[in-house]
Amino acid sequence: MQCQMCKAESIAMQSIAIPFKSLNFQALKTLVNDTLVVDVIVGNEYLYRDINDSIRQGSLTSVYTNELTDATQYMLQYTAAQLKNMGFRDEIRASGPSGITLLPGGERDIKGDGKGSVNGHIVVVLSSDLTARDAARKLAHEAYGHALFFILRKDPNHAEDKARGGNQELEDQIQRSIEETERNYGDVKPSRSKKIKRDH
Ligand SMILES: [Zn+2]
């Protein structure tokens, strides 16, 4: 059996390669120092509390496909080059709901998704289908975005019902956390010629 906590821990470490100047490290410190417990789980199924106080099961999934290859299979009238010009990307990307943050009392938050945590903890669930890099990106989104804002008593929701950018502060935080995670990944790529910057 795989140790889910170890896996989650290693995902967290990947997102904070440069601790002291790191926004993600500061976010992680805030999460760890709070009295609320944050569980990070890697798996495709999770339990949540709904508005009627019932405990239900939700699921995550992540499917990796090449958008351009897919398009060539259902838009047969075009060549791959034409489809590429039309904006279909020739890269493998994940799709599907691949992560969620369940907050204590989230089931009663009218601005949220109606799902709350069942154990009074903040529960971050990451799909086990994600690659390590995408899991680190997703962790940045869920933990250093949604969970952090909840702990800081800021609005932790995307505000999807409003015009785009309804919760700009959250969107900015998520974007910066993901960018940092990507930079950290870039820094630890096996290209030995590149000097890895470290702050001590
Ligand atoms: Zn989100």
Image (cartoon, helix red, strand yellow):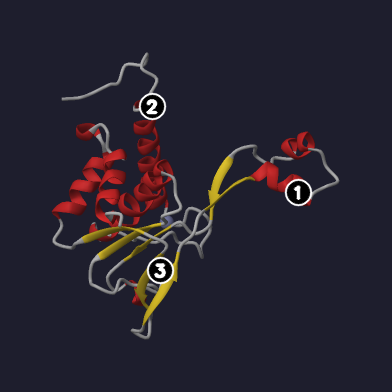
Q: Distance between the residues labelled 3 and 1?
A: 37 Å
At label 1, which amino acid type do we have?
Answer: Gln
The answer to which quarter of the image holds residue 180 is top left
Whether ligand 1 has any atom under 8 Å from the Cβ at mark 1 is answered as no
Q: What label sits on residue 98 in the rendered view? A: none
Q: In this figure, which residue is indicated by the disc labeled 1?
A: 73
* Local secondary structure at mark 2: loop
CA separation in Å, label 2 and label 3: 37 Å
For the point 15% across and 57% down, the residue is 34
- Say which quarter of the image contains residue 187: top left
The percent coordinates of residue 131 (x first, y second) are 44, 45
Compared across the picture, whether 126 is left or right of 21 comes to right
- Which quadrant of the rendered structure holds the C terminus? top left
Of badges 3 and 1, the one in the foreground is 1
Q: Are marks 1 and 2 in contact (CB under 8 Å)?
A: no
Residue 116: x %, y % from top left: 33, 72
Label 2 environment density (alpha carbons within 10 Å; few <14, some 14–19, many ≥20): few
The quadrant the N terminus occupies is bottom left
Give the label, 2 or 3, closer to the camera.
2
Q: In which quarter of the image is ligand 1?
A: bottom left
Q: Earlier in the sequence, mark 2 or mark 3?
A: 3
Q: Which of 30 and 126 is in front in this view?
A: 126
Q: Residue furthest front?
A: 1
- Dot 1 lies on which element? helix
| Residue indicated by mark 2 | 189
Q: Which amino acid does the dot numbered 3 rest on?
A: Gly
Asked if residue 49 is positioned above or below residue 24 in the image, the reply reads: below
Label disc, if present, on residue 112 of the rendered structure: 3
| Label 3 secondary element | loop
Which class describes the residues within 10 Å of circle 3: few (<14), some (14-19), or many (20+)?
some
